Amino acid sequence: MLHKYIRLHTRNTMMLRSTCATRGKQLTRICVNRYTSSSSGGGQAEQKQQPLTPRASALTDEIIRVDHAGELGADRIYAGQMAILGNGPMGKTIEHMWEQEKCHRKQFETLIQQHRVRPTVMTPIWNVAGFVLGAGTALMGEKAAMACTVAVETVIVEHYNDQLRQIMDSPNPDKELLATITKFRDEEQEHHDTGIDCGAEQAPFYKAMTEVIKFGCKTAIAISKKI
Ligand SMILES: [Fe+2]
Ligand SMILES: [Fe+2]
């Protein structure tokens, strides 16, 4: 009776134990593939489990979470600007920057899955806040929209430069992340320069407005690093 039970159980459930050795650490996983009986009596796997990849280091985890949040916010800011100014003379310029932000966001969405990083719990807030900021400043005029771009991109360029220094100072620098952030930092700098070239500094209350936006961005970065 016991022998019969063991045979049945073995047919229905297969346990595979595999060991993945990565970066000197070993991750052990147990995959359980359930087999179900078909009408002909044969077995068929219901699902395959994806192989595990090593968890990101604390620094990489923090960088990917905050940058994913930042690029999401940037995407929404330009979406807000396009909603108001998309058909105007600045439309093409804003659209070009928006397309680059979409690529940045997509890249961090890939990285967040690849490294199994938890996105910030603030994602829905940044989603709405970004659009409101972009559309709100665009409603004040093209120069105000550009002032918003200058303020946001100033903070992002500083933020990316800080991260590049942190990665380079780390014991095992992630070269792929370094290259990604370097490329994005250069494109954010271009966005900043475009804003200046398009008359951001002539926007009403330029100084006060950019200081408020910079403070908001820095606060969002500090929050997104941790939660
Ligand atoms: Fe970006
Ligand atoms: Fe940008």
Image (spheres, rainbow, N blue to C red):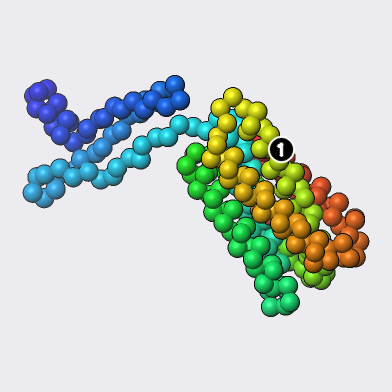
Q: Say whether residue 194 is left or right of residue 210.
A: left
The one of 175 and 162 positioned closer to us in this rendering: 175
The one of 26 and 136 positioned closer to us in this rendering: 26
Q: Residue at x 77, y 50 (%)?
A: 154
**Could you classify mark 1 by the number of other residues whose Cα lies within 10 Å: few (under 14), some (14-19), or many (20 or more)?**
few
The one of 166 and 209 positioned closer to us in this rendering: 166
Q: Position of residue 138 (x, y in %)?
A: 77, 68
Q: Say whether residue 212 is left or right of residue 184.
A: right
Q: Position of residue 205 (x, y in %)?
A: 91, 61
Q: Is mark 1 within 8 Å of ligand 1?
A: no
Q: Tell me: residue 107, above or below residue 171.
A: below
- Which image quarter is the C terminus in? top right
Q: Residue at x 28, y 34 (%)?
A: 32
**In the image, what residue type sits under mark 1?**
Asp
Q: Tell me: residue 116, above or below residue 100.
A: above
Q: Position of residue 133 (x, y in %)?
A: 75, 60
- When asked about the image quadrant of residue 137, the answer is bottom right
Q: Residue at x 39, y 35 (%)?
A: 52
Q: Tell me: residue 17, above or below residue 118.
A: above
SS class of the residue under badge 1? helix
Q: How many marks?
A: 1
Q: Position of residue 163 (x, y in %)?
A: 67, 37
- Which image quarter is the N terminus in? top left
Residue that label 1 marks = 162
- When asked about the image quadrant of residue 198, the answer is bottom right
Q: State whether residue 144 appears in this view.
A: no
